[in-house]
Amino acid sequence: MFRSLLFIPGNNERFLKKSTNLRPDILCFDLEDSVSSDEKEIARTLVARHLASQEEDMESSNYVRINSLDSGLVDGDLERVVIKGLDGIVIPKVSNSEEVIQIIHKIDAIVSKRDLSPRIGIVPSIETAKGVINASSIASVHENVVALVFGVFDYLYDMNIDAEYDDHMSYNYARSKLPVDAKAAGIDALDGIWQKVNDIDGLIKDAVNAKKLGYSGKTLIHPSHINPVHDIFKPTKKQIEWAKKVLDALHDSFEKGSTRGAILLDGKMIDAVHYKQAKAVLNAAKQ
């Protein structure tokens, strides 16, 4: 499920502990924007420790937003957080598909060295004009790319647009293009954050607009935004039907201890990741 991705500052131990009781679809522990340069190493340590302590049956997936490629911090970030308990990586400020491949190769080397699950989800964040133009190739560059994120504020900065966030015309083209590119690649798209934390009515209107554009959900910066966003991005009939088929197909493998792993369903390979997603869809539908 990609209804909600909640950013948690990686250098805040109290927030990390509290996040265990939250239920967004994705908990994204941040090493980038919310962490000052002098606390990057502290954040790596706290996030790695938190990931290692997580139980396997948690409802939320655990992602980490690393620093951008041009920061010089990516190798250090990945060495610390690509461990058991990690489900995916959010890559900020992606401008082209080659940047995604570079990071996937780095992750693959660590995964192989540590004998981890080979499927680490990759979510490129599109935050620049170049990223918007190249979003289609970014979305389809590798099978581990599972979603795109629209980083609206960095996009406005890159475009030298000084506008209120509510002025949708300032970023309407970019916001509209991303879910189309994502859908064409068979993946999801997550809309940008709603910055006005206490304006829940504004959040709801913004999320409704995002859904009309084809987004699967939104990125969030406050726990109070989780339930309103989940109410809007409810599982569709098509998603529920898919989830039932996946559970039926993989039930023996994951509930009865069968030796079967990944299998073919409707022409596509499905495995443990899809099984977890299917259970999340049906749980959300019941709720």
Image (spheres, helix red, strand yellow):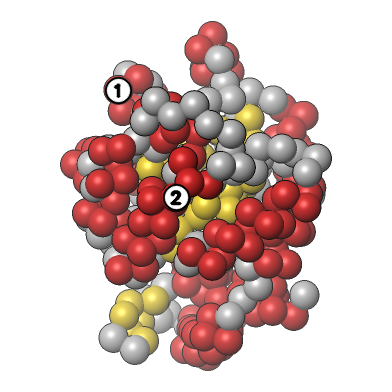
Give me the disc on residue 18. Answer: none
Q: Is residue 57 left or right of residue 44?
A: right
Q: What's the residue at 69%, 25% (across, down)?
A: 12
Q: Secondary structure at mark 2?
A: helix
Tag 1 residue: 70
Of discs 1 and 2, which sits in the foreground?
2
Q: Local crowd at mark 1 within 10 Å, few (<14), some, or many (≥20)?
A: few
- Residue 158 visible in the current orientation: yes
In the image, residue 78 sits, relative to residue 62, either above or below, namely above
The amino acid pointed to by label 2 is Asn
Quarter holding the N terminus?
bottom right
Q: Residue 76's quadrant in the figure? A: top left
Q: What's the residue at 75%, 39% (across, down)?
A: 197
Q: Is residue 283 left or right of residue 68?
A: right
Where does the image place residue 83, in percent across and percent down from the top left? Answer: 47, 42
Spatial CA distance of label 1 from label 2 is: 27 Å
Give me the disc on residue 172. Answer: 2
Q: Residue 234's quadrant in the figure? A: bottom right
In the image, residue 44 sits, relative to residue 149, either above or below, namely above
Q: Secondary structure at mark 1?
A: helix
Where does the image place residue 49, in percent across and percent down from the top left? Answer: 61, 33
Q: What's the residue at 53%, 31% (across, down)?
A: 163
The amino acid pointed to by label 1 is Asp
Q: Residue 283's quadrant in the figure? A: bottom right
Where does the image place residue 162, in percent across and percent down from the top left? Answer: 49, 26
Quarter holding the C terminus?
bottom right
Q: Is residue 36 left or right of residue 269?
A: right
